[in-house]
Structure formats: structure tokens, C-alpha cells
Image: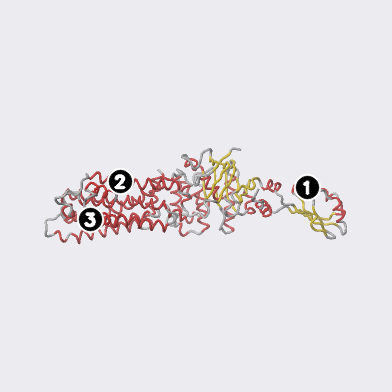
Amino acid sequence: MNTLTIAVQEIRVGLRNRWALATTVLLAALALSLTLVGSAPTGAVKAERLAVVVVSLASLTIFLVPLLALLLSFDAIVGEHERGTLTLLLAYPVARWQVVIGKWLGGGAILAIATVLGYGSAALALWANGSVSAGAWKAFGGMVLTSVLLGASFVAMGCLASTLVRERATAAGLAVGVWLFFVLLYDTTLLGVLVADQGRVVGKGALDALLLFNPADVYRLFNMTATESVSVYSGMAGPGDPAGLPPWAYLGALLLWSLVPLALSVLAFRRRAV
Amino acid sequence: MSVVAGWYNVGKRYGSVAAVDDVSLELRAGEATALVGQNGAGKTTLIKLLLGLVRPDAGSVRISGLDPAGASGSHARHALGFLPENVAFHGAMTGRELMAFYARLKRASAVRNAALLERVGIAHAADRRVGTYSKGMRQRLGVAQALIGDPQLLVFDEPTSGLDPASRRDMYDMIDALRAAGATVLMSTHGLVEIEPHVHRVAILHGGRLRATGTLAELRNESRAEARIVVRTRPCCTGQVLAALPAGARCSHRSDTSLTLEVKPQAKVALLRAVLAAGDAVEDVEVHTAGLQELYRDLIDEPDDE
């Protein structure tokens, strides 16, 4: 109950300071432009437009959604502390875990609303322009769902950064570091390791496991291989089996990427002196 | 009288600094208590311990029999209203919205929020963003949120600091009204003089230790600060008065027509009797009891190496 109250307050603040609006507009604008511009090359080949959109939107999401999520959450706790509102909040009959979970729910909800509305507008535009196959709808639905989960996991990591440090600026730096690491550095490093290793130590199984240690990669694997039509356009189809895991495993992994940082955040917050 | 909350041999260190050192103090139902001390004396730490925001290193803290930092601590905070020092709110929300939020956290009906805002005198600004409020208005909103749900125990940390005289007076009127309604009030302040008429008991903190607790009259009696009595006599009769003085009185100034006498508070009445016994040699007597400021200085000047 308290958790929900805090989450709702978080959403209200997000609506009030236009964060929710800005995020929705940004995602909708990008999705719509990808849909309208990106549909040009599909005219000649017999390609399904929504499948192409899923691939391009998913690639965009991997960069953008984690960034938005971290921006939304890095000052969840440390910001309240610096404004001086945390003492008052904790003087209410509220447990500390409720504050952390409430902040995460609120931030995640803002991002979820923005994603559903933003990407949904693109889907609507396509649907209005022609028929879309059931398979493509499924791929699109999966993409939206996993985008929400990806956002939630980075909101959780932002909350963790926010509970670990004593200053807002440090939390912001930490959030940027998290983004750089998971979105840019992890894959590059992994690629470097694979090239140097030449398959001697890191086998296929190990690679699959390593990819699960990055929510952005989990998201990519889920969406690029979602359906046959999608994997054709994403370049993931081919003789080699691109992914060894069923879809629910990816969803579970993404969910864990929310729950583990959240649990750590609750633990850290309980030790934090206010 | 039943005990609403208490600290029992509580100690709390921050690094090498003892913020609170072996403090025992109880808040009794219906009483207003002031925590008096300079900045850094440990007032806010004591309050944070009471709210369960900080865990004690030694001793224990109880609110209605519960440990506020324990598993059921959030229950203990249901019947408590708190006004933090330099209260802050999310500036993007309006006063009414914030009151609704805090009422939900306390499971209190939001119906009375408007009346509370009216009571603290900011009903006209209820629908303005708190970011546009002045310091005094924020403080009033702070009091309004503390009063949500009719708490039995009210904790005000430096309620008057930074307020203009009119707001200060309003704040004290509010505290008096709460006292009259039977609430238990704890407030911290550095202004001992200012709060005297508004509290039953005073606890004086210095360097994390409790230097004295009691009513102001009790503190005066315990204090070493001496009362000063100025006696005006007919010319050349000062010797006659001096001769009549009881032991313990000290003459600090003597002229042809006046004597300034210093005496322990306990011996004051005996001295006055002796002076008046000098008959018509005495023309006038002025009694200066130790001012609160002197009293306070006297209490916190005790040597630290006891």
C-alpha cells in the first residue's frame, strides 16, 4: 500500500515535471520516423514492414531506453536526501524497502507508459497503412514487453546507484558508467575476447551465458531472434543456431536484472544513515 | 504519568565523535519538553534516534513500547508527527497534493487536510506549487503535515529557526494549542529564553551529554548561578545591614546608600528576611534572579573532564 502510494507520487511528479511527456514524445517521434522512413527499402522486396520496424526499433531501444531509465532513477534516493525530503518521508510509517520498491515501480511505470504509447503509435501508423501478419504483431508485442522490462532493469540499477552514494553528482556519474559499460563496453570487450580466444576457452555455451550477464544483450537476443521473419532482417538467421535458449529464459533473465539490483538497493538503503 | 517515549542510556557515535553519549530521558504523556543546546549538541541525533532513522550504538529507544528502528518501527511512527529542521518538500507539487500524499502514508483521511491547511494559515496557497512558497509558508506546511492523523506525540526540530517574529509567534501559539489539547510535544531549540513559557520541562544538552533536566524552577535551584540583590539604604546605614547578613551572602559592591549582594538561590529568602529585619534603614530592595541565559551558560560550562 505504501509502496503503491510512493509509486503513484513518483508518477505524478514525472507527469508534473514533463519527464513522462518528454520521454513519450521522444520515443514516439523516433518510432514514427523509423516506421515511415524505414519502410522505404521494404517496397522492392517482399518484406514485412512491421518486422523491419521491430528490428530497427529494438536496436534503437538498446541505446535509448537504458539511458532514459538511468536519467529517471539516478536521483531517486540521493535526490530526496539532498533536497532534505528523505528524513521526513522516513519519519512516516514507511519501511525502507517500500521506498525503494515504490521508486522503482514509479520510474518503471513512467517508462512503460512512454514505451507503450510511443511504440504503439508507430504500430498504429503501420496498421492504418496496411495489413500486418499475426506473427509480426507477436514480435512487436514481445519487443514492447521486453523494452519495458529492459527499462525496469536499468531503473533498478539507477536506484541502486542512488542508494550507494552520498551525492547526486556521484550517482549521475555512476549512472553514466553503468550505461557505458552495459550498452557499449560489454559487447566490444566480449568481441575482443572472442577474437583473441579463437574459440579455445570460450565456447558457445559460455558465450550464451556471458550474454545473459548483460540485460541489453538479453534484450537483443530475444528480439533479434523472436520470429523467423524478424531474424531474417536482423541478420541472425542462418545456418548457425543463433540462440540456444527459449524465450521465457530471456524474459526471466531480464526480470532477474530488475530484482537483483533492487534487492541490493534495499539492503544498501537499510544500512544507510539518514 | 504514562511514558510516551524514552531514551535509555543511549549512545551514538559518528566516527570518533560521540554525537550522543549516555542520554536517558523520558517524554511523559501530555507534557511539552524542550531539548536545548547549541548546534552540534546532539539534539537532532536524539530526534533521529527517536524516529528510528538512526540506530543507537548503545542503550535503547522506545516509542509506545516499540523500538522505532526495529521491525515494527513503522507502527511506532503511526502516532507521531514530525517537523524536520529546515523542512523541504518536492517543489513541483502543490500544498494540497503533498498533504494528500502524506495522509495516505499515514492511512489518515484526506478530508481534514483542508482544515489543517486553514489552521496553519496557508489555505489560500493550497493549490500553488510548493516551490513558490516562502520559508515561513513551507514551515507552516511542515506543521500541517505533522498534524495529519492527530498524532499523540509531536516532534518539532528547531521549529522557529529562520522565521520572522510573526511566524514565530504563530508557531508558539500552535504549540500552546497542541499542549492544551493534551498532545505530548518535544521540540529542540537553541533559544532557551524564547521557549520558557511554552514548555513544562527542559532538557539541556551539551557535547552529546544531558547536562540537566527539569522544570525551569528546578534548574534554577540546582544551578550555581547566584541571585543578585541590590539593597538601597538610608545614607550611612549600609554597615548596619551588612552586620545582619546571614552566612553565604557576599557583598560585591558597597556605596554610601546601596549594597549589591550575591547569594545562592537557596539562601535567597533567608537573606531577604535578614535584610528586611534591618527595619527602616532599608529603603528599597531589588531582586535579580539568574537570567535564563546565565543559567544556561552556567549549566553547559561544567568541566568536560568529570
Instruction: State the residue in front, A26 or B131.
Output: A26
Where residue A5 sits: x, y (%)? 40, 47
Measured in 3D between alpha carbons, the distance from the residue under mark 2 to the one under mark 1, in whole angstroms, is: 79 Å
Q: Amino acid at mark 2?
A: Leu
Residue at disc 1, secondary structure: helix
Where residue A105 sits: x, y (%)? 36, 48
Residue at disc 2, secondary structure: helix
Where residue A93 sits: x, y (%)? 46, 44
Q: Residues within 10 Å of mark 2 (few under 14, many from 20)?
A: some
Q: Residue at x 71, y 47 (%)?
A: B221
Instruction: State the residue in front, B135 or B290.
Output: B290
Residue named by callout 1: B269
Disc 2 + disc 1, Cβ < 8 Å: no
The answer to whether marks 2 and 1 sit on the same chain is no
Where residue B113 sits: x, y (%)? 47, 48
Residue named by callout 2: A255
Residue named by callout 3: A195
